[in-house]
Image (cartoon, rainbow, N blue to C red):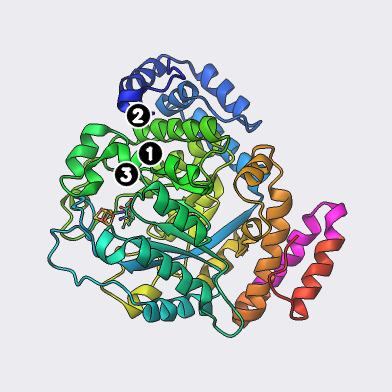
Amino acid sequence: MVSRRIVRDTGYIDEEEILNSLKQAKTASKAQSLDIVEKSKSFAGLSPDELAVLLMNNDPEVRDAVFEAAHSVKERIYGSRMVFFAPLYASNTCVNNCLYCSFRKDNKDIVRKVLTEEEIENETKNILNQGHKRILVVVGENPRLAGIDYIEKAVAAIYRTRSGKASIRRVNVNCAPLSAEEFRRLKAAKIGTYQIFQETYYRETYRQMHPSGPKRFYNWRIEAADRAMDAGLENVGIGPLFGLFDWKFELMATLMHAEHLDSKFGIGPHSISISRLEPESNAPAAENPPFTLTCEDMKRIAALLRLAVPYTEIILPTRESPELRNQLYDLGVSQTSAGGGYAKAHHPETEQFPTGDTRSLAEMTRRMCHEGCIPSFCTACYRSKRTSGRFMKLAKHGDIHKMCEPDALLSFKEYLIDYADQATRVEGEKTIAERLEMLEPTIKERIRTLLAEVESGKRDVYV
Ligand code: SAM
Ligand code: SF4
């Protein structure tokens, strides 16, 4: 049994208990597994022991039941909207040596670059011109060249950039762990979400993967989410980098990390990313991943996470193939990056990864319409202070979709008018008309009126 106590010397994650729980779960019957799936449909989440049972059961009937339940939980909580964001790699200088990343200090084969404010503004204009309203700034760890002073300036540069009347409405940040004081500065810079991946929750692998630099300190990293939340940054994103260690262990540990934050702050992680280790040059662990994951494993990860932590946003990065991405959207993913290529076009040396999905944002929105999703550029929760606690309360009760779907329609309408080509606009308007009809009668007329306001030129409209 996984106990609920906090184990001080190994952080919040008790490795032995996770491994034991997975071992014991092998004896659970198919009927027990199906009962757990049934229970999860009421958005209660899964305990680590329940998750272990579903992880260890390979019966196709259980697998299908998990997929079906994950789809319905996602629809019920978030509706069928898919939020888009654009990553912006601001700096690739790094003092660490992570064996899986090409930004690592010992990689002498890349050109190091810290974008100037002017370059960041140009990059932001490109991203704006594609129709995005959210940016995730990604920064390698270099306190001297790209520390908190730099990150503050980068965030400010993005917020002040205009392309016509358009501007970025939410800047999220993925950077190395900061001190409490630095997190307070990040909060003052008005960022949306702070994102920090533990990479692997298994300490021995963590030690091997991070041979030098400040990132070698496991506790400093795992406690970054706590420091950020203590500093008032309540929207925190976490996640492992799948492929460094056994994915089943990582999923169990991710759930325990989420439970820790939820019990300490009353707010769980705003998002969990499901990144998979991708090939990288001069990054030995990426060239030869210690653990390989199949597409089927990725589907189980998305679905089980949706059942285990139903209220959290699940984020899928750009790097997966279009086919797999489409399947993962169905199983629980609620946010994704899109429109890869802009950073590469302007700063080839700064973009870190080859993208498996090179579809343009317009192509992706059309595809989503086909698949029954509403592409969303919404930032309403953040702007109407429906963040953190309030957002999570609504999400936990399965009520957030009542805002998400209408707001998705309004933001999509804005995108179609301002950025879409004719074919995308036709496809998109059809989706909006269909989804409008599916809204509850009490809200339908109001949204029809708000859509008309967007049509007549009003912007940033939300319920
Ligand atoms: N330096 C900061 C840090 O490590 O937290 C942020 C920048 S780092 C580039 C952002 C994330 O990229 C890492 O947390 C890691 O999960 C991911 N990453 C690094 N190498 C990767 C690879 N080969 N494949 C997929 N993701 C990778
Ligand atoms: Fe640096 Fe982050 Fe890459 Fe590690 S993952 S080498 S810390 S940029």
Q: Are marks 3 and 2 in contact (CB under 8 Å)?
A: no
Q: Residue under label 1, please give it.
A: 223
Residue 334 visible, this angle: yes
Q: Quadrant of the N terminus?
A: top left
Is residue 50 shown above or below 73? above
Residue at image x 49%, y 38%? Answer: 305
What amino acid type is highlighted by mark number 3?
Glu
Where the C terminus falls, by quadrant?
Answer: bottom right
N-terminal of the pair, mark 2 or mark 1, is 2
Residue 237 versus residue 142 in the image, above or below: above
Q: Is residue 356 visible?
A: no
Q: Residues at badges 2 and 1 in contact (C-beta under 8 Å)?
A: yes
Amino acid type of disc 2? Gly
Q: Secondary structure at mark 2?
A: loop
| Residue holding disc 3 | 199
x, y percentage for residue 151?
39, 64
Magenta segment boundaries in residue numbering: 427-444
Q: Amino acid at mark 1?
A: Glu
Kindly report the distance in space between the C-alpha atoms of the residues bearing marks 2 and 1. Answer: 9 Å
Q: Measuring from the top left, give residue 8's x and y in whole percent.
A: 35, 24
Mark 3 close to ligand 1, CB under 8 Å: yes
The residue lying at 40 percent from left, 58 percent from top is 321
| Residue 403 belongs to magenta span | no
Q: Does the closest atom of ligand 1 sit within 8 Å of the Cβ of label 1?
A: no
Secondary structure of the residue carrying numbered label 3: loop
Q: Is residue 175 above or below residue 452?
A: above
Q: Secondary structure at mark 1?
A: loop
Pick whichever of labels 3 and 2 is earlier in the sequence. 2
Residue 409 bears which disc, if any? none
Kindly identify which residue carries mark 2.
Answer: 11
